[in-house]
Amino acid sequence: MSSNWPAWATRSPASLRVDRWLATGTGVGAVAAAVVVVATVLGAKPLPGIGLLIIPGIPLLVIGQLWSILVGFVKRNWPHLAHLIWPHSSGPD
């Protein structure tokens, strides 16, 4: 990555791919959680193998948190780039 990483983190095609991947993974995780809750409430016993969902869940959580921290850091320290992330933002909160 070049020295212009704040711009990369906010407007590059790779950044958009990361955003979409995280949003998709989070959506799938939310649907899976809802299915588990409904199946557990309606069923008489827990679902077998449900612990395996932690394998993709933990990395997705960590990557999503780090990505959110990076984007927030860019917004706070480079307010002139904030409009690229939040179009109606006037800068740092």
Image (cartoon, helix red, strand yellow):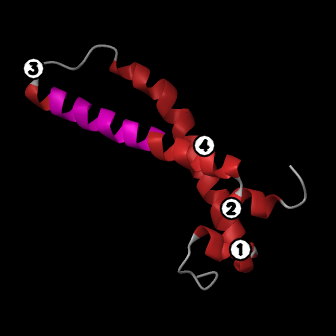
Q: Residue at label 1?
A: 81
Which of the labelled discs sits on residue 10, or is there none? 2
Residue in the image at 75% along x and 74% along y? 77
The local secondary structure at tag 1 comes to helix
Q: CA distance from mark 4 to mark 2?
A: 16 Å
Q: Is residue 20 magenta?
A: no
Secondary structure type for disc 4: helix
Are discs 3 and 1 less than 8 Å apart at CB?
no
* Mark-to-mark CA distance, 1 and 4: 22 Å
> Badges 1 and 2: C-beta atoms under 8 Å apart?
yes
Dot in front, 4 or 2: 2
| Residue bearing the label numbered 4 | 63
Upstream in sequence: badge 3 or badge 4: 3
Mark positioned earlier in the residue sequence (4 or 2): 2
Q: Residue furthest front?
A: 13
Query: Residue 32, how many percent across, how many down?
Result: 32, 33
Q: Magenta region: which residues?
A: 25-40
Quarter of the image that includes the C terminus: bottom right
Labelled disc at residue 44: 3
N-terminal label among 2 and 3: 2
Pick whichever, 45 or 24, lies toward us. Answer: 24
Question: Looking at the image, is 91 positioned above or below residue 84?
Answer: below
Amino acid type, callout 2:
Thr
